[in-house]
């Protein structure tokens, strides 16, 4: 595919951060306008290098990280689409390019180089904006990364950034009093001595958050008049009639076109049915109900999606290349994309047991609609399903549930074989 197109150079070593005053100038005004409060825990005497792990709800998270690490140099791991038309700038401010949800051993050595420079590698391990202000799945290898780097681990957990600018409704909602907590989570000695399972468990425990719960507890009211718009992209299944893909939203109202039921989103982002029972007042509860339904499809091995799609490729930082139509199949085996480019057929297959999550976009760039972002070491493909009978949110949920299903089955098979080997031989 795109055989004559030069790929992004993923092997370039990271540059030490330059232009720090520009980053400060781009970050601090926004944080000040939102009255962001930074709290530090256990950070006395902690100096670079250390590994900074941040949760990811909105672009303001990065501004908070600039504030938290001030005045030290940082190197942010950034997805390739962030480099489009500004690679020269991002490299100078220390950004490291990564294709999402791919195994990239070269990244390990780049992060080690950052540490050798005495600087701070910054990673967003969820690798995407949270869809509904709650924790996204973390990679299995996060503990191994900590063991490899042998650095102290500091976390930066932000609250209020999702409800201020949710992934499905990006305009600034003018939330005041956002917060960020910077904490020393793992010492250098613990990074060397704890198992990667123990390290991962500690990180996962610290990454538990819920922006809507935070909003309700803080009593932060949002008067933005279009606060419900786009919510149907996350809440794609009606809990009243269970129909999928027929939810819509406008203003402060969420509606099911199939049965006509409506819900109002109040200033605390709580849901209330306009008539009848309110199935879910808390947005993440509705989202997790959808996940439960997807899990049931996976566990009875009935999950399957097949649809036509339009595809854009992003082989380098110069921009997107339209490579035409294709067929997207997502089923129990994994994700398969097949099409033709320049008269030659191609097929990309991502096995379910190796693909723990996937990146999605809503109305990406305002052009072709919602898309699934598929990555290989050499290509990033933006796949836009055609029609109405799909949800990229469901594809994302199914990807995670399929991975968990196959990994569980694999673990059970290993235990069975181990038990057979250890049991006395039959006579």
Image: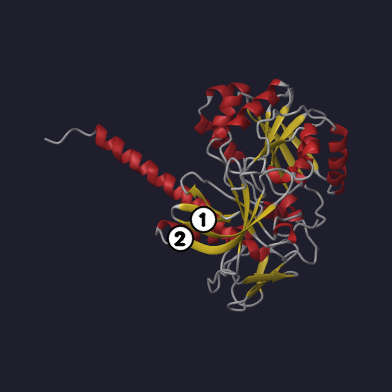
Q: Is residue 179 left or right of residue 306?
A: right
Q: CA distance from mark 2 to mark 1?
A: 8 Å
- Reading the image, the residue beneath label 1 is 398
Would residue 152 be visible to someone looking at this image? no
* x and y, in percent, of residue 273 in the image: 64, 72
Question: Under tag 2, what secondary structure?
Answer: loop
Marks 2 and 1, the one that precedes in the sequence: 2
* Residue at the left extreme of this rendering: 427
Give residue 219's mark: none
Looking at the image, which is closer to me, 236 or 317? 317
Looking at the image, which is closer to me, 334 or 58? 334
* x and y, in percent, of residue 110 in the image: 66, 28
- Dots 2 and 1: beta carbons under 8 Å? yes
Quarter of the image for residue 238 reads bottom right
- Reading the image, the residue beneath label 2 is 303
* x and y, in percent, of residue 170 in the image: 76, 57
Q: Is residue 116 above or below residue 163?
A: above
> Which image quarter is the C terminus in?
top left
Q: Residues within 10 Å of mark 2 (few under 14, many from 20)?
A: some
Residue placed at 59% from the left, 36% from the top? 203
């Amino acid at each position: 595919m795109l055989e004559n197109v030069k790929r992004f150079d993923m092997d370039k070593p990271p540059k030490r951060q330059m232009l720090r005053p520009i980053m400060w100038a781009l970050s601090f005004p926004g944080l000040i306008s939102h009255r962001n409060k930074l709290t530090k825990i256990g950070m006395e005497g902690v100096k670079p290098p250390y590994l900074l792990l941040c949760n990811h709800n909105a672009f303001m998270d990065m501004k908070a990280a600039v504030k938290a690490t001030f005045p030290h140099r940082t190197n942010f791991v950034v997805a390739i689409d962030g480099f489009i038309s500004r690679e020269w700038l991002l490299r100078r401010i220390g950004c490291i390019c990564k294709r999402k949800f791919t195994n990239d051993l070269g990244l390990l050595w780049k992060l080690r180089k950052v540490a050798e420079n005495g600087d701070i590698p910054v990673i967003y391990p969820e690798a995407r904006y949270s869809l509904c202000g709650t924790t996204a799945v973390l990679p299995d290898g996060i503990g191994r990364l900590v063991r490899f780097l042998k650095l102290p681990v500091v976390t930066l957990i932000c609250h209020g950034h999702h409800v201020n600018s949710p992934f499905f409704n990006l305009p600034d909602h003018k939330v005041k009093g956002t917060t960020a907590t910077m904490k020393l989570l793992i010492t250098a000695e613990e990074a060397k001595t704890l198992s990667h399972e123990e390290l991962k468990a500690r990180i996962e425990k610290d990454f538990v958050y819920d922006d809507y719960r935070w909003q309700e507890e803080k009593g932060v009211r949002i008067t933005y008049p279009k606060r419900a718009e786009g919510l149907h992209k996350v809440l794609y299944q009606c809990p009243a009639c269970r129909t999928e893909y027929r939810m819509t939203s406008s203003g402060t109202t969420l509606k099911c076109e199939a049965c006509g039921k409506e819900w109002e989103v109040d200033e605390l982002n709580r849901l209330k049915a306009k008539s009848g029972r309110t199935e879910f007042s808390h947005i993440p509860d509705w989202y997790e109900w959808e996940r439960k339904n997807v899990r049931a499809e996976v566990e009875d091995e009935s999950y399957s999606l097949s649809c036509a799609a339009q595809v854009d490729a992003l082989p380098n930082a110069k921009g997107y290349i339209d490579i035409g139509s294709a067929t997207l199949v997502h089923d129990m085996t994994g994700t398969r994309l097949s099409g033709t480019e320049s008269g030659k057929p191609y097929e990309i297959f991502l096995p379910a047991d190796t693909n723990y999550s996937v990146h999605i976009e809503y109305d990406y760039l305002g052009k072709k609609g919602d898309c699934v972002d598929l990555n290989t070491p050499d290509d990033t493909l933006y796949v836009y399903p055609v029609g109405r009978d799909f949800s990229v949110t469901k594809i994302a949920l199914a990807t995670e549930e399929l991975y968990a299903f196959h990994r569980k089955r694999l673990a059970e098979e290993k235990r069975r074989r181990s038990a057979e080997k250890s049991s006395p031989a039959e006579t």
